[in-house]
Amino acid sequence: MRKLPPRTRFFAYDELATALTYKEGASPFVHSLNGTWQFCYLQSPREVPAAFRAGDYDAIDWQTIKVPGHMELQGYGKPNYTNISLPIPVDPAAAPANNPTGLYYRRFSCTPQLARQVLRFDGVDSTFTVWLNGQLVGDGHGSRLMTEFDVTDLLKPGENTIAVQVEKWSEYSFLEDQDQWWLSGIFRDVTIIDEGGLNDLQITPQYQEGQWQIAVAVQAEANAHLRGKVYFAGQPVAEAALPTGTTTIPISAPREWTDETPNLYTLVVADDAAGALVPMRFGLRQVEMIDDQICLNGEPVLFNGVNRHEFNPETGRALTQEYILSEVTQIKRAGINAIRTSHYPNTPYFYDVCDELGLLVIDECDLETHGMYVTEMPTDDPYWQGEFVSRAERMVHRDFNHPCIVIWSLGNESDFGENHVAEAAAIRKLDVSRLIHYEGDRKTEVADMYSTMYTPVEDIEKRAVKLTHQKPHILCEYGHAMGNGAGSLQDYQDVFRLYKSVQGGFIWEWKDHGLKQATPAGPQYVWGGAFGEPVNDGTFCIDGLVRPDRVPSPGLLEYEHVIQPFQFFVAQNHVVVKSLYHYQTTRDLVLRWQLEVTGEKVAGGQIALPALAPGALSPVLSLELPEAGGVDAMLNLAIETTTVQGVFETGAQLASQQVAYQGLPAQPDAAATVSQTPAAVTITRGPLTVTVDRGTGNITQLSQDDQKVLAGDMALTLDRLPISNDMNVVAERQKERIATLFARCESIQMTQNDDTVMVAIRQRIAPPAINWGIELAVTLWVGAAGVTIRTRGWFDGEKPTEVPRIGYQLPLTTTVRTVDWFGRGLGESYPDSLDAAPLGHYQLNRDQWGFPYVVPQEAGNRMGVRWATITTATGPSLHVAGLTPFNLNVVGGDGQPLGNQSSDQVRLDARVQALGSNSCGPLPLPRYRLYTDPFDFTVTLNLQY
Ligand code: GAL
Ligand code: MG
């Protein structure tokens, strides 16, 4: 058999220095056949002249073509863009009568040097037959897979000839119906490689009992004596003899590979008898499921990925190494950490770049039968099983050693059935060190993760809150970036970060694939139909984050911002930065800040950031800010590098954020202290003390010089007394159990400087018995301004559509005496009833606060409140200021309208429900209703005498 069984792709070198460069062009054992070939374009294989088969090449009337390249982009035939539909009859048993066929021919000189010569095709679309020196070598298919032939006995020293016949359509086209331009020809490298005794090499990194090692599986000629030496940064670090079979080599002082720390080792296999060195790079990284999460080196992964087609607007899927390097660098600079090779194995060099720059790759099998759905599902047809399986095996063998590949994908949009089951089994047999993905496997029968496309945020949340053991969810496609779009990327990112079982996704797609065409108006990018294709899918190929020329669209800028590796927390003049990295400790970064008032810069500066461990909060950084505040005072923050770091230049901006500036508090500096017990965290600053319960995450006490203000938890609640116009929704509210919420603290992180403490709390609150809840991210600052609380919340599960209010309830130890406020007044206001309540500075006594409706019900809300001072019968008064206007109300401690209660309750609400007139008329208009959308509000509380 001349055709080699699938195996790893490798090259031999003659010297260590060149072997370690990993540049095949530097090897004397690599003979590239790329370049200009003679070419003859025919309408069908029936037209192939007898002279071609006979090896009488001089008798043929040749034109020329560039290899690698596509026929259709060099004047032979036309491109055709389809997404799903096949542009030919859906009949794999018969190729169309008109089947464009290209004859390729060239002379080359090559002097065989080592024991064996291998002819390698990295990609030919869709089938081909090859002759060397007039002798039939064999045929190949699987457009985006490698095909190799042993040509040792056919190759002569000196001049040789090679001829290739390529057909555009074949039965395999039906398995390659990806959403792309139909482009055929020899579009990847053609090479002859000299080889010594090594036949195949698979390196599996293993982490066992605290020690890294590699398992090196070698297949070699019987008489070969191979030795392996491992190099890191050019220096040898380990070595071992490599007999056929598997050898384990321990790696001491290991430097792990992750997408953030792409440390690469090179194993150099020396075949002294042959004088050949085969370098193979690897990375120390382990992919595994831990606690139902996809983990890389023990840490759960968050995929902030893109789907990437191989595409160049001028050369289609034929890409140069320079183009691949610059494109993957652009992706990495955008902060993207993962690429799905939608929907086929890529040009081999792509994986080298991902190994070097640090990108996590889902390597996808060249298999999509989308257009066949109209007749049959090949996945259930035993006829196709061998082809499904061999495509997967060829991919796994070729790409096995790349650390960047963390997941194998069975293909795209090919339904799910027996042949996929066989494909997955074949992959698991070859490689136990990676996970399997397939979006069509909805019940995750063989896939390690649940993968979906374009799933609405609500549906992601619904599954995510099911806390039973389940495989993690990723979105192999989301954020359809066609034209102007995609929207809601931040909403997706929020759910990715909130729920442990959701591990991110891949934007569809990286780049527009518009072909560059000369038109009377000059060169333009064109889409389906531009070549008169009767079956085409129009602009569906123009759906990327960047244009065909890789100019970033606003969609990419949005995505970069959404996935940036730092989070900012701000209150008054204090900033805390959180590293969202998983593996690397930050270094050489500055926080640059600028205060603008109505767009004019009034102050600015920069502060060096201390090194931050993965996931860590910085200390509280205090900025030298002026007094300026108000609605149009904005603080612009950015994090920049001060040295070159990987793909980032000095001065590169890694993250930025704008926040409204709250102004400086008038209070003096004072020392802040934190005391902790397993039950609670207590923060004291001057006379103020704040206690947070570790079990619930709620503030349980606020006190001033030991005078306690709270009679119970300051909890986020949703309920209020029903109004008469609620009479038809009361029963539903009871079923939703909004009045009995349980709070649980999921995590609490703290940081501080001398006078300010910040606590970041993740909470979940949920009713008993039924399936919905709210995820809360609360940041609490105790500083000169008092306690600033930013609360963000996301409803999830089978959630109520509307709730009566969203906000904090502060049960006081005493009653309210007076309320002094700036906001709507003097009387009460609700979203659909506020015209008679202008903004102003008002003051009322407790007995004037709520209107005394004859039937007791909700009363007294004041909307649009900027600040309020609430004096009490005994103890300190409470001052509240909102970053944005909030709702204020005071009711009895029992939740009833104010009367003769002995203690009261203050409510600080982000939003309240409207009134309507549904007791005998309509519900509130939709625009006034309080839907269970995510919410975000900030209030600052301070106690005073
Ligand atoms: C998906 C498919 C992609 C692309 C996208 C629409 O269903 O997997 O290949 O066609 O839709 O742009
Ligand atoms: Mg498709």
Image (cartoon, rainbow, N blue to C red):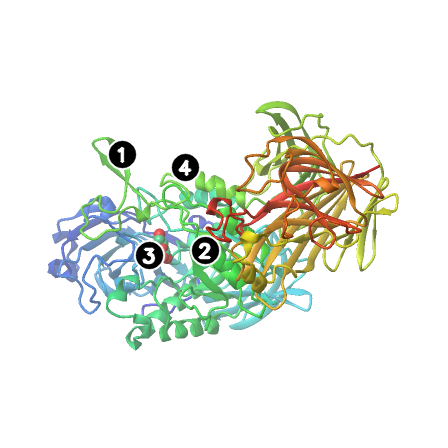
Q: Residue at x 11, y 58 (%)?
A: 47
Lower sequence index among marks 4 and 2: 2
Circle count: 4
Residue 456 is tagged as 2
Kindly indicate whether the residue at mark 1 contacts the one at mark 2 (C-beta within 8 angstroms).
no
Residue shown at 42%/48% (left/top)?
25
Q: Which mark is residue 523?
A: 1
Ligand 1 neighbours mark 3 (CB distance < 8 Å): no
Q: Nearer the viewer, mark 4 or mark 3?
A: 4
Q: Secondary structure at mark 3?
A: loop
| Disc marking residue 551 | 4
Residues packed near mark 1 inside 10 Å, few (<14), some (14 to 19) or many (20 plus): few
- Residue 270 visible to the viewer: no
User: Label 4 amino acid?
Assistant: Val
- Check disc 4: other Cα within 10 Å, few if <14, some if 14-19, many if 20+: few
Q: In what quadrant of the picture does the C terminus appear?
A: top right
- Foreground residue among 771 and 843: 843
Q: Quadrant of the N terminus?
A: bottom left
| Viewer can see residue 505 | yes
Left or right: 277 as drawn, with respect to 285: left
- Whole-angstrom CA distance, mark 2 to mark 1, is 38 Å
Give the CA separation, mark 4 to mark 2: 28 Å
Tell me the tag on residue 123.
3
> Rounded to the nearest whole Å, what is the CA distance between mark 4 and mark 1?
16 Å
Nearer to us: label 1 or label 3: 1
